């Protein structure tokens, strides 16, 4: 995916100001910054949830799928898990149900969970369901917006490992949005640093974290908790 000059305006407020970047095939690119920096607005613009200007190329119509921060809020509480996953699947009839079960297995869930409701699952299981649902549309790119921040620390690592496995097995491209540099360092290939609606620094994980060039990036790194 190639993004050129992406801007989003809410009235007089310019929330995203001419952002340009690329996500290559099978690449996980982290988009980091403080709350209010414009990260989630970029995500919503890419999937068409907010009006945007600029160009987005390299993905087909509907080829960008989003996984939201709160998996419970993103799933219909009255819809069983299997049906929720099947909604985005192209196949019809029995093949559709079979594909939904396959997708659940692909994200590490027992196919027996297809008959349950979201309230009957743990937070980590719900986020896996959200990933399976996104994969059902066979996307060119998945936008993962703070997908581990609402999870217990003990569950976060398992979800991050799943994202890495999906990239390895499917060649999946991911725009991984987070405020947590430790998480981004673990899962991403490259990092984009966003501040006040603009990208102020970009590079490989080693470049940005190992030798940051922008004062804002240095401040974000200094704010990361360290174990004594």
Image (cartoon, helix red, strand yellow):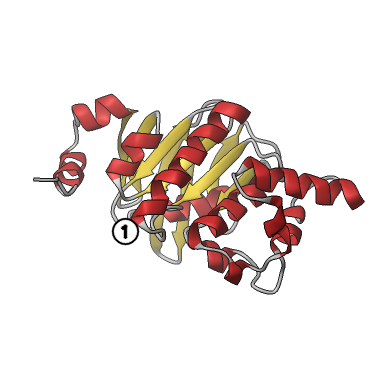
In the current view of this chain or complex, which residue is farthest to the left?
228
Relative height, residue 209 to residue 149 (above, below): above
- Is residue 188 found left or right of 224 in the rendered image? right
Q: Position of residue 111 (x, y in %)?
A: 71, 51
- Is residue 207 found left or right of 40 in the rendered image? left
| Image quarter of the N terminus | top right
The residue that appears at 47% across and 58% down in the rendered structure is 69
Q: Secondary structure at mark 1?
A: loop
The residue that appears at 56% across and 59% down in the rendered structure is 126
| Image quarter of the C terminus | top left
For residue 44, say whether it is visible. Answer: yes
Q: Position of residue 98 (x, y in %)?
A: 82, 47
Q: Quadrant of the rendered structure where residue 189 is?
A: top left
- Is residue 20 found left or right of 111 in the rendered image? left
Q: Position of residue 83 (x, y in %)?
A: 76, 60
Q: Position of residue 43 (x, y in %)?
A: 50, 50
The residue that appears at 72% across and 58% down in the rendered structure is 114
Q: Nearer the viewer, residue 2 or 72?
A: 72
Mark 1 neighbour density, 10 Å: few (under 14) some (14–19) many (20 or more): few
Q: Which residue is mark 1?
A: 35
């Amino acid at each position: 995916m190639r993004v050129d000059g992406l801007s989003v305006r809410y009235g007089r407020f310019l929330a995203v100001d001419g952002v340009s970047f690329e996500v290559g095939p099978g690449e996980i690119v982290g988009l980091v910054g403080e709350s209010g920096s414009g990260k989630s607005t970029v995500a919503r613009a890419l999937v068409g949830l907010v009006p945007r200007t600029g160009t987005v190329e390299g993905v087909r119509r509907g080829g960008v799928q989003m996984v939201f921060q709160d998996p419970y809020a993103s799933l219909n509480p009255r819809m069983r898990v299997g049906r929720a996953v099947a909604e985005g699947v192209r196949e019809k009839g029995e093949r559709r149900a079979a594909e939904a079960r396959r997708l659940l297995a692909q994200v590490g869930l027992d196919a027996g969970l297809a008959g349950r409701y979201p309230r009957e699952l743990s937070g980590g299981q719900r986020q896996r369901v959200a990933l399976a649902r996104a994969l059902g549309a066979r996307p060119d790119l998945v936008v993962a917006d703070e997908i581990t921040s609402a999870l217990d620390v003990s569950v976060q690592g398992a979800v991050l490992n799943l994202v890495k496995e999906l990239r390895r097995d499917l060649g999946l491209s991911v725009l991984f949005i987070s405020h947590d540099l430790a998480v981004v360092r673990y899962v991403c290939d490259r990092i984009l640093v966003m501040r006040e609606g603009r990208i102020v620094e970009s590079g490989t994980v080693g470049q940005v974290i190992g030798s940051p060039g922008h004062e804002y990036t240095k401040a974000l790194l200094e704010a990361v908790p360290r174990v004594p």
